[in-house]
Image: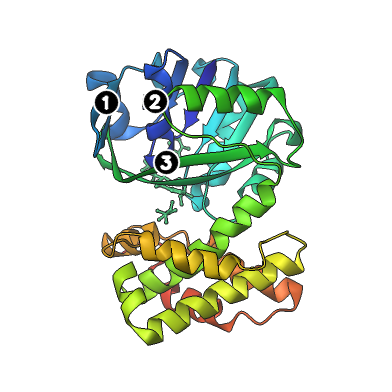
Amino acid sequence: MRIATMATGGIGGFLAVKLANAGHSVATIARGAHLDAIRANGLQLDSASGTEIARPEIATDRPDEVGVVDAIIFGVKGDALDDAARACLPMIGPETVVVPFLNGVEASDRLSAILPERNVGNGVARVSTTISAPGVITQTGAFHSFIFAERDSRPSARIDALRAAINAAGSAAPETDDIDKELWSKFVLFSALSGVTAAGRCTIGDVRTTPELEALFKRAMSETAKVGRALGVALDTDLEAQIWETLMAFPAQGRASTAIDLEHGRPLEIEWVSGAATRLAAKAGIDASVNAALYAILLPHKHGR
Ligand SMILES: NC(=O)C1=CN([C@@H]2O[C@H](COP(=O)(O)OP(=O)(O)OC[C@H]3O[C@@H](n4cnc5c(N)ncnc54)[C@H](OP(=O)(O)O)[C@@H]3O)[C@@H](O)[C@H]2O)C=CC1
Ligand SMILES: CC(C)(CO)C(=O)C(=O)O
């Protein structure tokens, strides 16, 4: 397949290494020192199972030089979505699918306001990766799973082809017949994890062992789940219990990327996480005072410091 990564950070970089090393024609869109390093040394993925280096066929900051691709792995932070989406236009042909893996539940709709809707899919990533140095992606933990589909979850040859490519490349792209459920199930987890570990400057271990933080986490989760259900998403009736159980298996030192971004003075994606939970709750007439409070506490740090 011809695949582009817009861009080549934690998400795009992880998949670019796997797909390029599996023999696909991969164009990595990146910029600055990260692009220079990819061009000079290749793109490196460090994980518990070792180091993999890929030499993507194209590494560029000029998407207009790439040509039309079959699929675009779309992974930028929420505030960068609009510019990055517009930059994808020259790579899009009639059959191209653009799959967003952003946290939150609004990326696919936002992309569809900029790109032709028939070219937009929807997806959710369960992985923990970051750019640790120019040209280097580091994975924490061993989990990596990318769930995606057409926006309405209908069966689709182009989605099947990308799933097959990712599975054969050594990652995991399980099938789904309800992408909204997948997205919202992660959003219920992530809105609570992001808000509590960032605003509380704490770890998952702290949330598990401090009853007050546990209560806060569970209230945030329950608010977001109520919003999803009010919007008609078929969330499991015991989703909140499942998430709490999952949290028991996370490393105690773990935190949401929002908490790590806060620590490093980087911009925060809160508009699309606690902010989105608050906004969508207001629209649905649901009280989301915990998400609103977590959002407010983090707002002064939204643009980084
Ligand atoms: N990484 C992870 O483990 C997970 C991430 N997610 C979500 O996926 C999304 C992407 O995250 P992640 O991959 O970690 O983000 P990163 O910050 O690692 O990577 C994003 C990259 O996009 C680049 N970029 C942004 N706009 C453009 C542009 N117009 N042209 C070229 N490059 C551009 C950035 O460059 P620059 O630094 O120069 O701005 C940066 O290198 C987020 O919503 C995140 O919450 C979800 C699950 C797990
Ligand atoms: C919680 C986690 C690691 C799960 O993929 C995540 O999405 C993030 O921190 O951004």
Residue at (61% x, 52% y) in the render: 183
User: Residue 260 vs residue 85: left or right?
Assistant: left
Which of the numbered marks, if any, corresponds to residue 262?
A: none
Disc 1 crowd rating (10 Å Cα; few below 14, some 14-19, many 20+) is some
User: Residue 240 vs residue 140: left or right?
Assistant: right
Residue 213 sits in quarter: bottom left
Quadrant of the rendering where the N terminus is positioned: top right
Helix, strand or loop at label 2? It is: helix
Any atom of ligand 1 within 8 Å of the CB at mark 2?
A: no
Disc 1, disc 2: CB below 8 Å? yes
Given the image, on which type of amino acid does mark 1 rest? Glu
Where residue 49 appears, as percent x and y from the top left, is 25, 34
Q: Nearer the viewer, mark 3 or mark 1?
A: 3
The residue where tag 1 is placed is 52
The residue where tag 3 is placed is 144
CA separation, marks 1 and 2? 8 Å
